[in-house]
Amino acid sequence: MVRLKDGPKGSPATTRVQWKKYKVAWIQNIIAPYTRPFFERLSQHPSIDLFAYFCAKTHKERKDAWGILESDKFNYTILPGITVESWGIIYHINPTIIPKLIKGKYDVIIIGDCTDFTMQAAFITSKLLKTPIILHSEATKSAQWFEGVKGVQWLLLRAVNPLRKYIIRRVNALVVPWTICRDFLLEQGAQAEKVFIAPGAIGDEMFSRQSSRLRKEKERLKQQLNINSKKAVLYVGGLIRRKGVGYLIEAYGELKRDCEDACLMLVGDGPLRTELEESCVTHHIKDIHFLGYKSYQELPKYYSMADVFVLPTLEDIGGLVVHGAMACGLPVITTKAAGCAVDLIVPGENGFVVDEASAGQLCSAIKRIISNETLAREMGNKSLEMVNTRWNINENVNGVVSAIGYVCGERKP
C-alpha cells in the first residue's frame, strides 16, 4: 500500500491512503466454521484480491461435528481430488491446483500446511513461477504426538518431518496464530524476521453481540434445559480422550461437595460419551448435563448461560473454544497443554492455567472463580477487553496482510 499526504495550498496536510492491490491465492484443507469469518474479512481488505482453494469440503471425522458453512462473501472453489484418511492421517491429493496457480498469475501464494501432496505441489509451483509463498502454520512441537499416535501413523509423521523443515526454511514468510507455534518454527530453522503472528480468532463480533443479548435471558435459557443450578461450569468440545473431560468431571465431583448449587454443562459429542455418563452414575455425581453437539452458530447461547469456561485438554494445537468464551465475556481455565494458553490467559486476571491431568488444580481454579462474583465479573471483563484490543479477526487479518506486504517487498520486517 502507498500512503500519500496532500491538501490544498495553505491548508493543513491531509492523509489519503492509496492501496496497492495484491492478488492472493490461499490453499486450505477444508471449509471450517471458525475460518469462514476470517476469509470473509480478509477478502474485504482494500489491498487484497483473495481467491481460496479448498482441498475438500470436510473430513470424515468432522461430518458429525461441524456444520459446513459455505459463503458468498469471498471467492473460493473446492478442488477435485482425493482425500486419504487412514491411520489417523489425512492426506489431500488435488493435482489441479498446479494449473490453477499457473493460470491465476498470483502475486502471493499462501499454503495452510506442508504435509500433503496439494500443499507440496503448490510450494513447488510457486518456486518454479518465482511467486512469493507464505506458510500459514499451526504446528507445535508436541502437536504431532497426540496420545495414541503409534505404529504406521508414528512412522509417517517421522518421515514427513524433514520435508516440513525444508519447506519452513525456504518459504518467503510464515504466519502463525500463537506464540507457541512461532517458537516451534524457530526451532525448525525459520528466520525470526519472517514469522508473523496473526492472532488466532473466531467470529468474535458475532459471539460478543449474541452473548450480550442472550445473557439477559440466562435464567430462562437454563430453565428450558431443566438446569436449576445457580452456577454453571461449561465445556465445549469433543468427548474424546485427549480433551481431558474425565479430569474435568472428577474435578467437578470434588467441587460439588462444597458448591452444591453448581452444575456442569458439556457441549459436544464423541466416542467417550457413554463411558463418561456411566462414570457420573457410578460416582454419584449429579447435575452434569450432556447437551450433545451444537452448531457453531448455537454456541453463544451456551456461553451466555455459563459462569466460567473450562478446557481441560491434555493436548491441543490451539483451543479456539477458549477464545469463543472470552469473546462472550467469560473467565477461562485451561491447561498448559493448550497451545493458546500463553497468549489468551493472563493468570489471575482473566482466568487460570493449570497442569494437565490434574483434577485437583482444576477444582481449585473453578472454585476460586464461582465462589467470588466480583472476581468472576472482573475476569470476564478482562477476557472481553483482550479480545477487543488484540485477539480478534481484525488483528488476524492485519497479521496476514503484514506478511503479504513483506514478501512483496513493500516493507522491511
Image: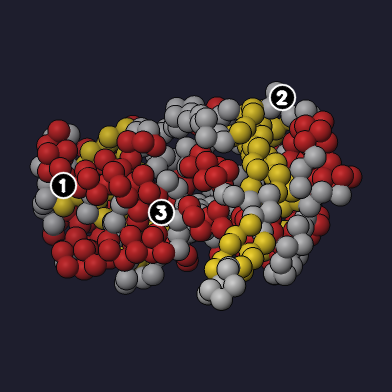
Find numbered disc 3 in the image and state the secondary structure of the residue it sits on.
Answer: helix
Mark toward the viewer: 2 or 1: 1
The residue pinned by badge 3 equals 323
Q: Mark 2 points at which residue?
A: 81
Q: Which residue lies furthest to the right in this view?
A: 128
Q: Which of marks 2 and 3 is nearer the N terminus?
A: 2
Quadrant housing the N terminus: bottom right
Left/right of residue 276 with respect to residue 306 in the rendered view: right
Q: Which of 228 and 46 is in front in this view?
A: 46
User: Which secondary structure lies at badge 1?
Assistant: helix
Above or below, comparing residue 36 to residue 389 in the picture: above
Q: Which of 253 and 97 is in front in this view?
A: 97
The answer to whether residue 412 shows anywhere in this view is yes
Q: Which sits in the foreground, 206 or 294?
A: 206
Q: Which amino acid type is marked by label 1?
A: Lys
Separation of residues labelled 2 and 1 (CA atoms): 48 Å
Q: What residue type is labelled 3?
A: His
Give the mark nearest the N terminus, 2 or 1.
Answer: 2
